[in-house]
Image (cartoon, rainbow, N blue to C red):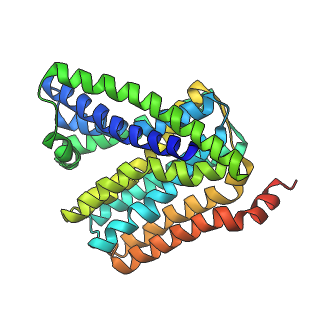
């Protein structure tokens, strides 16, 4: 029953997240908001709504391990799996200079998050700092796009405009259904994940890092697969870099503003290091102006499978060492 509960929660989150974004985009366009603003705000925040609601719900229910695990595990999955699988279909190419710049921004956000996590406690003021850092990055990106004629906002909206509600009332219905569904889906997912952890005898952190993180990364995987089929490697890579930055600044930051989070020790000593290493891998790729091709995609996928395997079969020793004084 608990597995069906998790599956139902994930399905509801995926569907209702899409309804929320499409409804919000439609309302914004019907209201005359520019595509540039929509791309940098509504789409960016809306696609991260499932992760945000899951993290807030987990924190409020006293499961910070699921909240932290969801964010860290999603970032690892985004790089190794969400870039790896589409690369098996078609090599992902992009504007290496822009990708390199955005990679450094993502790593900067990751280091700030890691530093705050290593302090051991992310409270209101730390959360406010993370949210402020994200707001600054969005503002700078918006100003750069506005002055430089960057069409990335149009690319981000392309898929949503194909199946968007056409009237204001239908759009508002999409938004309402999306918000209600996100709350219901997150509750089902978190409660089911906690039950699975208790029954299987594994920590909530491991469930958050694997099952919950993989589930909430499915929208990014779907977007990247579509981009690969359309030969839009820059959209796939930008999707991952932006999502990772949102996860570690906006999602953790907003969650901490509502409920302070204590960083789980095992994530500090292992998974955060894996997250930073996976992020750093992208730097030499973009520096060498190389696409993420099929061979590298296969390596990424194999690395992710190994990481998941280590969580369930090789982490007992790591967790024991992490808990030692």
Image vertical order of residue 147 relative to residue 90, above or below: above
Q: Nearer the viewer, residue 35 or 184?
A: 184
Q: Is residue 253 visible?
A: no
Residue at the spot x=58%, y=66% of the render? 307
Residue at the spot x=33%, y=39% of the render? 15
Image position of 173 (left or right of 111): left
In the picture as drawn, the residue positioned furthest to the front comes out as 1
Residue at the spot x=25%, y=39% of the render? 39
Image vertical order of residue 45 relative to residue 266, above or below: above
State the image quarter where residue 230 is shown.
Answer: bottom left
Looking at the rendered image, the quarter that the N terminus falls into is top right
Image vertical order of residue 254 relative to residue 275, above or below: above
Q: Nearer the viewer, residue 10 or 217?
A: 10
Q: Is residue 23 visible?
A: yes
Image position of 56 (left or right of 117): left
Residue at the spot x=52%, y=39% of the render? 189
Image position of 299 (left or right of 1): left
| Residue 196 point in image, percent of width and height | 63, 47
| Residue 67 point in image, percent of width and height | 59, 40
Q: Nearer the viewer, residue 73 or 189?
A: 189
| Residue 211 point in image, percent of width and height | 54, 52
| Residue 71 point in image, percent of width and height | 53, 46
| Numbered-mark total | 0
State the image quarter where residue 100 is shown.
Answer: bottom left
In the picture as drawn, the residue positioned furthest to the top comes out as 169
State the image quarter where residue 31 is shown.
Answer: top left
In the picture as drawn, the residue positioned furthest to the right comes out as 325
């Amino acid at each position: 029953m608990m597995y069906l509960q998790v599956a139902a929660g994930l399905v509801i989150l995926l569907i209702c997240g899409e309804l929320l974004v499409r409804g919000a985009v439609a309302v914004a366009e019907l209201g005359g908001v520019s595509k540039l603003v929509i791309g940098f705000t509504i789409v960016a925040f809306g696609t991260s709504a499932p992760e945000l609601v899951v993290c807030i719900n987990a924190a409020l229910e006293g499961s910070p391990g699921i909240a932290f695990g969801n964010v860290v595990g999603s970032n690892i999955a985004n790089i190794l799996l969400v870039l790896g699988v589409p690369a098996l279909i078609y090599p992902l190419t992009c504007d290496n200079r822009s990708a390199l710049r955005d990679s450094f921004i993502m790593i900067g956000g990751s280091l700030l998050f890691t530093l705050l996590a290593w302090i051991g406690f992310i409270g209101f003021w730390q959360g406010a700092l993370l949210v402020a850092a994200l707001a600054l990055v969005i503002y700078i990106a918006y100003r750069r796009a506005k002055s430089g004629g960057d069409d990335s906002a149009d690319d981000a909206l392309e898929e949503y405009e194909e199946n968007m509600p056409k009237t204001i009332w239908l759009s508002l219905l999409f938004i309402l259904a999306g918000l209600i569904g996100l709350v219901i889906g997150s509750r089902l997912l978190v409660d089911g994940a906690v039950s699975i952890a208790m029954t299987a005898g594994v920590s909530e952190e491991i469930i958050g890092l694997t099952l919950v993180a993989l589930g909430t990364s499915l929208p990014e995987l779907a977007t990247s697969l579509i981009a690969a089929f359309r030969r839009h490697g820059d959209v796939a890579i930008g999707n991952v870099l932006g999502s990772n930055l949102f996860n570690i600044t906006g999602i953790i930051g907003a969650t901490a503003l509502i409920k302070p989070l204590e960083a789980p020790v095992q994530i500090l000593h292992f998974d955060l290091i894996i997250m930073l290493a996976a992020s750093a891998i992208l730097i030499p790729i973009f520096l060498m102006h190389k696409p993420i091709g099929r061979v590298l995609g296969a390596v990424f996928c194999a690395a992710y499978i190994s990481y998941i395997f280590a969580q369930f079969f090789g982490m007992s020793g790591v967790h024991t060492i992490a808990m030692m004084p």
